[in-house]
Image: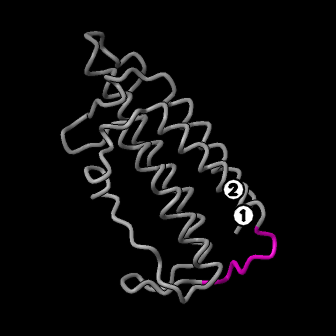
Amino acid sequence: MDRPHLIAQLERHASVFRHLLKDLSAEEARWRPAPEKWCPLEIICHLYDEEREDFRARLRSTLEDPEVPWPKIDPAAWVSGRRYMEKELATTLEGFLAERGASLSWLRGLDEAPWTNAYIHPKVGPVSCELLLTNWVAHDLHHIRQLINGRYAHLKAHTTVPLDYAGTW
């Protein structure tokens, strides 16, 4: 596992999120490409919660003591339970970026960590530290793709100009 490379990707992704979400209008921040899809505000709220309560917390737990049960999470319930649509995009984005900074500092300080540790998940079996870190990067990429697709759908829905000159989407 190339930890420095994965950590550098997490850092670059923070910049991508900052630039994809910075200065969106309130309308675009809350616009959904379909009723069952998330809007940009919901995505950054989700990332903010996941940063603190999923990837960093679970990786820390697995590194410190893989026998300790992971903290419970329920990302789907958080959307309504934590009132994502009532949040402010700029504040949530800055909160996420601050948490990502804390994650990066913590990750860079793990020089002698037991990276071979694995948590035995009751449903999926062994979950290694390598799997957690790599999937943290993959999770970012998933939501970057989701944001880009949503931004394209928003543009397409709000223009009468054909977008085929730009290429096939």
* Magenta stretch: includes residue 123: no
Q: Which residues are magenta?
A: 110-117
**Please, what is the three-letter code of the amino acid marked with disc 1?**
Arg
Q: Residue at x 72, y 64 (%)?
A: 3
Residue 51 sits above or below residue 12 on the image: below
* Residue closest to the eye, 74 or 116: 74
Q: Residue at x 32, y 51 (%)?
A: 82
Furthest toward the right, the residue is 111
* Residue closest to the eye, 2 or 24: 24
Magenta: main secondary structure: loop
Furthest toward the bottom, the residue is 67
Decide if residue 131 is in sight here.
yes
* Residue closest to the eye, 150 or 94: 94
Q: Is residue 23 left or right of residue 88?
A: right
Image quadrant where residue 110 sits: bottom right
Q: Name the quadrant of the N terminus.
A: bottom right
Question: Mark on residue 82?
Answer: none
Q: Name the quadrant of the C terminus.
A: top left
**Please, what is the three-letter code of the amino acid marked with disc 2?**
Ile
Please say if the residues under marks 1 and 2 sit with CB atoms less than 8 Å apart.
yes
Residue 139 sits above or below residue 94 on the image: below
Residue on which the image places disc 1: 3
Local packing at callout 1 (Cα closer than 10 Å; few below 14, some 14-19, many 20+) is some
Q: Residue at x 59, y 79 (%)?
A: 62
Q: Is residue 147 left or right of residue 18?
A: left
Residue on which the image places disc 2: 7
